[in-house]
Amino acid sequence: MTAPTLATRFTELVGVRYPIVQTGMGWVSGPSLTAATANAGGLGILASATMTYDELEFAIKKTKSLTDQPFGVNLRADATDADERVDLMIREGVKVASFALAPKQELIAKLKDNGLVVVPSIGAAKHAVKVASWGADAVIVQGGEGGGHTGPVATTLLLPSVVDALGGQDGPTSIPVIAAGGFFDGRGLVAALAYGADGIAMGTRFLLTSDSAVPDSVKQEYLKRSLNDTVVSTKVDGMPHRVLRTELVQALESGSRVKALVAAARNANEFKQMTGMRWTAMLRDGKAMKKSGERTWQQIIMAGNTPMLLKAGLVDGNTDAGVLASGQVVGLIDDLPSCDELIQSVMTQAHARLAALPR
Ligand SMILES: Cc1cc2nc3c(=O)[nH]c(=O)nc-3n(C[C@H](O)[C@H](O)[C@H](O)COP(=O)(O)O)c2cc1C
């Protein structure tokens, strides 16, 4: 018997059974994980920031062959081929678009005009208000304990600040809010709903399922970690990035800038060859980044470096040489359920907790 749902505006909006999202994680959220989540009644999101255009096309088609349920694609608005990727998603009938880092207003408009549901991830209340004014259909709010690129404010404070900013203090928010960062069970889902959210999104918890394609040796490395074993480093690509505390990360943290820069340039070159991206395109992306933010050239080269470091760990299983993005929640996870078992246990526990609340 399957667990009953807790229907929210988000489940209605996207057409999924449960208010649970598996987020787009570079090198991790491929067709098998995304389709397994979709078939289990959650919203699975393919990560495309680490895929070439052709790989993304293949991954979308593959996911469609594995599930007839809705799923999403996570993309970078600053990619030089972001427009073509959006066209591809429209053509292939992808249901949901999510954004890694800042979205762009014109891409949101195009996606929406073509019937996609747009759900950017944000890390501050003012960004939630901004993307809502641009027409976003919902937001994923990621608190500081979350894995990957992350902010300084914990979910317990960021979430209510976003709910309030979207007018949800005494009623529904103007657009549905999905809470992310530190979630792994049914208690978290009930807490998020109590804060005024319409669902939860989980990254690290879905990475640690039997359906994720991360090598088993790497999963075992994650399972060994405690609540204190992640660190937020800006040394990987210049932006705060929550990763497992490994020897490489310690070396990056303590190493000289010159050494880090040389290693970064080497990895950026490898990424360029692997993705077929031309240096001119990388420089154009770099210039755009420099214009839009306050990033130094060192950080821009490091940005090209990040995908290679993550790939070394998450795909090649080289836990010493790679960087392993992870939320703090890794310290509370000690099993590798299937996506279906995970979602069922979250929903079953959520119902039990709701029934046990004092009235
Ligand atoms: C291995 C890994 C890779 C990630 N890659 C991406 C990415 O490519 N795009 C993105 O928007 N977020 C990425 N994230 C962040 C997740 O989408 C999500 O917001 C975060 O994991 C939520 O926190 P949690 O890990 O505590 O569940 C990544 C997270 C992890 C753990």
Image (cartoon, rainbow, N blue to C red):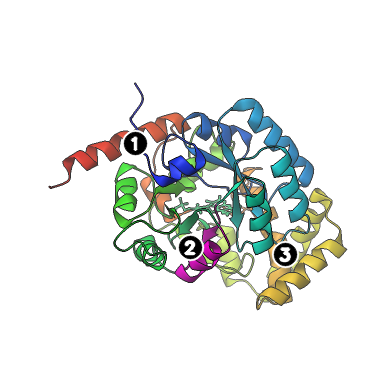
Number of the front mark, 3 or 1? 1
Looking at the image, can residue 259 be seen?
no
Depth order, front residue of 81/244: 81
Numbered tag placed on residue 103 in the rendering: none
Estimate the spatial distance between the alpha carbons at disc 3 and disc 1, rounded to whole Å.
Answer: 43 Å
Q: Earlier in the sequence, mark 2 or mark 3?
A: 2
Looking at the picture, how far across and down is residue 58, in whole percent?
A: 74, 35
Which sits earlier in the primary sequence, circle 3 or circle 1?
3
- Looking at the rendering, the stretch of residues picked out in magenta corresponds to 119-135
Q: From the top left corner, tell me how far across and down residue 22 is, in percent.
A: 50, 43
Q: Amino acid at mark 3?
A: Ala
The residues bearing labels 2 and 3 have C-alpha atoms spaced at a distance of 19 Å
Tag 1 residue: 347
- Where is residue 289? Give x, y as percent: 71, 70
Q: Residue furthest top?
A: 1
Say whether residue 127 is magenta. yes
Distance between the Cα atoms at labels 2 and 1?
30 Å
- Which residue, given by chain and number where applicable, does mark 2 sit on? 231
Say whether residue 305 is magenta: no
Q: Residues within 10 Å of mark 3 (few under 14, many from 20)?
A: many
Q: Is residue 275 above or below residue 104?
A: above
| SS at badge 3 | helix
